[in-house]
């Protein structure tokens, strides 16, 4: 299936995936710290195991950093 991940086109050699499986396949560092946007919607972490990814979907992996003074 063809996906857009962080604005980059990727070909994934699977027909069906969950967000959790995609995080593993893409070797996302610190998956427990990532926020996922799926087709414009921010996902609740509890839904990563049940949210299916399909051909043409747009995925963004987002990391929020704190800091400053």
Image (cartoon, helix red, strand yellow):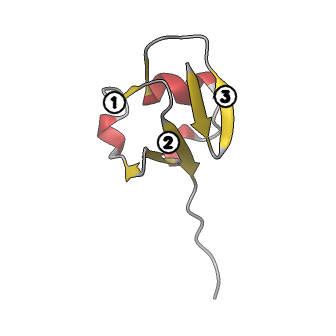
Front residue of 29/40: it is: 40
- The structure residue drawn at horizontal position 47% and vertical position 46%, both measured from the top left corner, is 36
Q: Residues within 10 Å of mark 1 (few under 14, many from 20)?
A: some
Q: Which residue is mark 3?
A: 10
Q: Which residue is mark 1?
A: 51
Toward the front, the furthest residue is: 56
Q: Position of residue 42 (x, y in %)?
A: 38, 52
Q: Nearer the viewer, mark 3 or mark 2?
A: 3
Instruction: Label 1: state its secondary structure.
Output: loop
Is mark 1 in CB contact (under 8 Å) with mark 3? no
- The structure residue drawn at horizontal position 51% and vertical position 30%, both measured from the top left corner, is 56
32 to 26, vertically: above or below = below
Question: Label 3 vs label 2: CA separation?
Answer: 22 Å
Q: Position of residue 32 (x, y in %)?
A: 50, 42
Image quadrant containing the C terminus: bottom right
Q: Position of residue 49 (x, y in %)?
A: 35, 27
- The structure residue drawn at horizontal position 67% and vertical position 34%, both measured from the top left corner, is 9
**Quick one: label 2 or label 1, which is nearer the N terminus?**
2
Q: Which residue is mark 2?
A: 32
């Amino acid at each position: 299936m063809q996906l857009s991940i962080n604005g980059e086109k990727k070909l994934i050699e699977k027909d069906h995936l969950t967000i959790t499986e995609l995080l593993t396949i893409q070797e996302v560092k610190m998956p427990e710290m990532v926020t996922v946007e799926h087709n414009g919607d921010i996902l609740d972490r509890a839904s990563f195991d049940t949210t299916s990814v399909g051909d043409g979907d747009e995925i963004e992996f987002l990391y929020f950093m704190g800091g400053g003074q």
